[in-house]
Amino acid sequence: MSKPPLLIAEWPLPPSATLGSSVRAKGIEREIRARLPWAASKCVKAEAGHIALRMPQAAAAEFSAASAKILRTLQGIEDLPVLPREAEDILTISARERHKWLKDGRLRSTGTRTVKLRGRAKAVTFHVFDPLHIEDVLDRDLPAVWREEDAREAAENRRRAAGKAALTRAGKGKAAAARNAREADAPRPKLEGWDAFEDEGLLR
């Protein structure tokens, strides 16, 4: 049995919007779905290079309304803030690197977003990023530069720690030597009654 014909509309999703990331494309898909009625949202899909809407012909009115909403949403979609996982995928970085570089200011946050995730009792707040900043970081290959900086810093920290440990060991050694010297130079205690004890010949 053949499937009933569908109403189909497609809109281009340029690289300037996705920044070459499938995770970012999925994020745009979720953003569009969030602005549509539930029934229409299930019919939206991010595909290679475009957003597609497919609905039954019986839903012509809903299809028309959804199409207009998608078109408005896609206008200026390049400015949609970049989410943490999207930034990691675009820049090919780890979550640890993202946290570190965000903390020291190399990755610049454009603000925070709070969402209630399905299955979680508490809302989650996270930093988002300006897509122009993320694109600049990508174009200049800054993650590679930052990794080299971090490696040099880690090596310098190890060198300093080793030097400090060596000084500590040397200090402890000198202190022990000085203590032994003081003990060797100190007069031996005179035991009371020792002379009489020795005169009795008890040690012979």
Image (cartoon, helix red, strand yellow):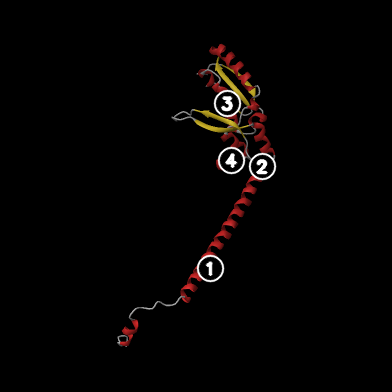
Question: What is the three-letter code of the residue carrying label 2?
Answer: Leu
Residue at which label 4 appears = 103
Q: Is mark 3 on a helix, strand or loop?
A: helix
Nearer the observer, 119 or 153: 153
Report the mark closest to the observer, 2 or 4. Answer: 4
Q: Residue 142 carries which label?
A: 2
Report the mark closest to the observer, 2 or 1. Answer: 1
Report the mark closest to the observer, 4 or 3. Answer: 4
Report the mark closest to the observer, 1 or 3. Answer: 1
Q: Where is residue 5 in the image (x, y as percent from the top left)?
A: 56, 16
Circles 1 and 3: CB atoms closer than 8 Å: no
Q: What element carries label 1?
A: helix
Circles 2 and 1: CB atoms closer than 8 Å: no
Please tell me which residue is depicted at 66% across the width and 42% down the height of the picture: 142
C-alpha gap between disc 4 and disc 1: 42 Å
Please tell me which of labels 4 and 3 falls first in the chain.
3
Q: Which mark is residue 174?
A: 1
Nearer the observer, 74 or 3: 74
